[in-house]
Image (cartoon, grey):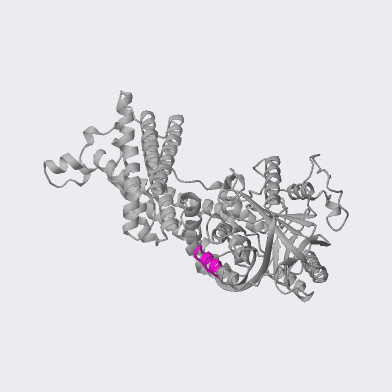
């Protein structure tokens, strides 16, 4: 994730789930009653409250209950929860404008009730404009179609004012009791409505037209760069983003599918089976990125992969960034099927090598061979790093194969980063010094593994879902541990279902398991089986260890940065790892190992699409407020001109 993508992801903290529609309606009626007490003077508090509910609350209730069916009848998808929250927000705007206008009228000797009603006209038009923008964004309809459900709240209020203000008498040309009863109820109206005249409704319609044109111009302006570079509308993105975060919908996948590109990605499977042929564990590594967030696209890929395995599944993070996000959750099934096909082609070996650790520059790599195939796990800890680009991973794996191993599973341990701080968030891209460090480390690891003697393999596994939840930075797979013994050499792999780790946490766990300090990881001697970790606790004996995260994005639905160790107590995580390693050691038994790879054709975001999307979205956010303010000021200026011409 780059800094630009981080800025976009961090906006999710401003999104919240819409309350239930009946909660919004109840609160709206309460606000209307309180506003009625302040706005009307019937001589009795309950009467004032009732008038507030009637003239302010009824339009809100009508908009809450009718916007959704009207919008859906026209092909939209506004929900009752959203429409009720929108109506409540618009009511609050009306009340605020009326309160401000009333205060100004009281303080001024020249302004009276007519000024307050003029402000109400502007408020009703503003409500129409806001509703028009939201309906266009959520339902994706044209301005003319969206204007129909958008006008319900303003239109209902206008009808009530028309009936109860006595305006009918200006248009009365005949009729009878029915007309008088239903369309001329001035005797039952508050005195504040006596200032309403027929031309006020013409002014309201004209100002609504002006504001509607302003909304249309605003949308067209901010939409232009999106359609030029991505071929999609910004409203499609906003609709999907808000729908996913606020309502849990998959609308965002439709947007991503429109901008996606076809890609061929390797899917590598490393399986371990017992002597009786049953599966012990399975490492599965599709070379894609498990994003973008929540369960959209491949966000919950690790869980889906784990569910497809017979043994304990380990789905670590591949060397791929956000450009290799799957566009829809349906694409995950393609990867699962490809992994199953690769699993069927595995040739097993009953020997493996002890793990080796190499370091080139900032890149560290643990490698272990099984037959002619190799598992490589890369980290930059204690330096900060995030995703490794797809091309860098392919090149590093090629370096290892050229050294003498046949198939390679290259894992990005993804285990040390400083969140969303910094200019590039530790991105490892082609041409960077870090990319060459990784490639050289992979080549050296391949050389050493090809020359290493092999011995029978024993394996033990353990798994705990834990009580932590995605908001705590831990996904549904919890913590998984595998212990591999080759001869008298023991290697521990810890996999945490999370998105990267807080700095220092990985080093603390590795030191606890191996007794090696950070300076000894690249080849120094261990301090022995009676070593102690940095916190003074005795370590569990292991010759090599590495900690990995899955990079699951189910932990990032609300929090853009929610790394392992950021929300949970680190001591508790270390205690879980201690317990699981002990259980895995007790589970050790002879196994055979084998690896195979297949290629899958999937639709991903595509080259540079993520950065383009993030840049455009951030530009809209940074410039949109200024543009919106300019449009509002221009519309208000036109409104003042209309009022001036109407009164002259």
- Looking at the image, which residue sits at the far front? 276
* Whole-percent x, y for residue 214 in the image: 45, 56
In the image, is residue 209 above or below residue 97? below
Q: Nearer the viewer, residue 187 or 314?
A: 314
Q: Seen from this angle, which residue lies furthest left?
A: 176
Residue toward you, 428 or 438: 438
Is 464 colored magenta in this rendering? no
Q: Residue at x 46, y 49 (%)?
A: 636
Q: Along the horizontal axis of the image, is 165 left or right of 622?
A: left
Asked whether the viewer can see residue 486, the reply is yes
Q: Where residue 399 sits: x, y (%)?
A: 77, 73
Give coordinates of residue 287: x percent, y percent. 63, 67
Side of 471 relative to 24 (left or right): right
Q: Which corner quadrant of the image does residue 404 belong to? A: bottom right
Q: Dominant secondary structure of the magenta stretch?
A: helix
Q: What is the magenta range?
A: 328-337
- Residue 327: x %, y % from top left: 53, 65
């Amino acid at each position: 994730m780059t800094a630009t993508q981080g800025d976009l992801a961090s906006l999710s903290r401003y999104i919240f789930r819409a309350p239930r529609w009946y909660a919004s309606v109840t609160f709206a009626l309460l606000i209307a009653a309180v506003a009625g007490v302040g706005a009307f003077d019937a001589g009795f508090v309950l009467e004032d409250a009732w008038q507030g509910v009637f003239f302010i609350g009824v339009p809100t209730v009508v908009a809450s209950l009718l916007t959704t069916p009207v919008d859906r009848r026209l092909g939209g998808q506004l929900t009752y929860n959203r429409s009720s929250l929108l109506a409540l927000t618009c009511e609050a705007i009306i009340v605020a404008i009326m309160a401000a206008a009333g205060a100004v009228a009281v303080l001024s000797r020249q302004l009276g009730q007519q000024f307050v009603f003029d402000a109400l006209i502007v408020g009703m038009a503003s409500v129409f404009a806001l509703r028009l923008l939201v309906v266009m964004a959520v339902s994706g309809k044209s301005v003319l179609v969206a204007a129909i459900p958008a006008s319900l709240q303003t239109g209902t209020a206008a009808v009530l004012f028309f009936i109860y203000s006595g305006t009918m008498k200006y248009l009365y040309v005949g009729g009878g009791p029915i007309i008088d009863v239903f369309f001329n109820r001035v005797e039952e109206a508050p005195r504040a409505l006596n200032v309403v005249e027929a031309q006020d409704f013409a002014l309201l319609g004209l100002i609504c037209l002006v504001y509607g044109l302003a909304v249309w111009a605003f949308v067209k302006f901010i939409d232009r760069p999106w359609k030029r570079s991505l071929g999609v509308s910004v409203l499609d993105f906003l609709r999907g983003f808000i729908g996913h975060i606020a309502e849990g919908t998959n609308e965002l996948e439709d947007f991503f599918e429109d901008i996606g590109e076809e890609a061929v990605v390797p899917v590598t499977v490393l399986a371990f089976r017992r002597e009786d042929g049953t599966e012990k564990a399975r490492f599965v590594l599709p070379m894609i990125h498990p994003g973008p967030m929540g369960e959209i696209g491949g966000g919950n890929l690790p869980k889906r992969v784990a569910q497809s395995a017979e043994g304990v599944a380990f789905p670590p993070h591949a060397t791929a960034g956000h450009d290799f996000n799957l566009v829809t959750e349906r694409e995950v099934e393609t990867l699962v099927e490809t992994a199953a096909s690769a699993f069927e082609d595995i040739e097993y070996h009953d020997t493996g090598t002890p793990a080796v650790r190499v370091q080139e520059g900032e890149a560290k790599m643990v490698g272990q061979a099984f037959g002619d195939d190799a598992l490589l796990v890369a980290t930059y800890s204690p330096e900060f790093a995030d995703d490794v680009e797809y091309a860098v991973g392919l090149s590093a794996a090629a370096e290892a194969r050229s050294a003498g191993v046949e198939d390679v599973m290259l894992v990005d341990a993804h285990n040390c980063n400083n969140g969303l701080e910094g200019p590039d968030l530790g991105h490892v891209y082609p041409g960077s010094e870090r990319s060459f460090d990784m490639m050289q480390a992979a080549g050296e690891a391949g050389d050493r593994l090809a020359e290493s003697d092999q011995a029978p393999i024993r394996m033990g596994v353990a798994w705990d879902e834990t009580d932590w939840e995605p908001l705590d930075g831990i996904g549904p797979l919890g913590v998984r541990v595998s212990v591999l013994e080759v001869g008298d050499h023991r290697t521990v792999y810890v996999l945490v279902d999370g998105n990267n780790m807080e700095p220092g946490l990985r080093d603390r766990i590795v030191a606890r398991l191996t007794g090696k300090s950070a300076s000894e990881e690249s080849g120094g001697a261990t301090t022995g089986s009676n070593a102690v970790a940095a916190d003074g606790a005795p370590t569990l004996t292991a010759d090599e260890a590495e900690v990995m995260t899955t990079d699951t994005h189910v932990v990032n639905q609300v929090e853009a940065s929610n790394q392992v160790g950021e929300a949970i107590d680190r001591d508790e995580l270390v205690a879980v790892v201690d317990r699981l390693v002990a259980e895995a050691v007790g589970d050790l038994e002879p196994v055979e190992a084998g690896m195979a790879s297949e290629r899958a054709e999937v639709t991903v975001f595509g080259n540079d699409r993520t950065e383009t999307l993030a840049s455009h979205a951030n530009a809209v956010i940074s410039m949109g407020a200024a543009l919106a303010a300019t449009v509002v000021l221009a519309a208000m200026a036109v409104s003042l001109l209309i009022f001036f011409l109407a009164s002259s």
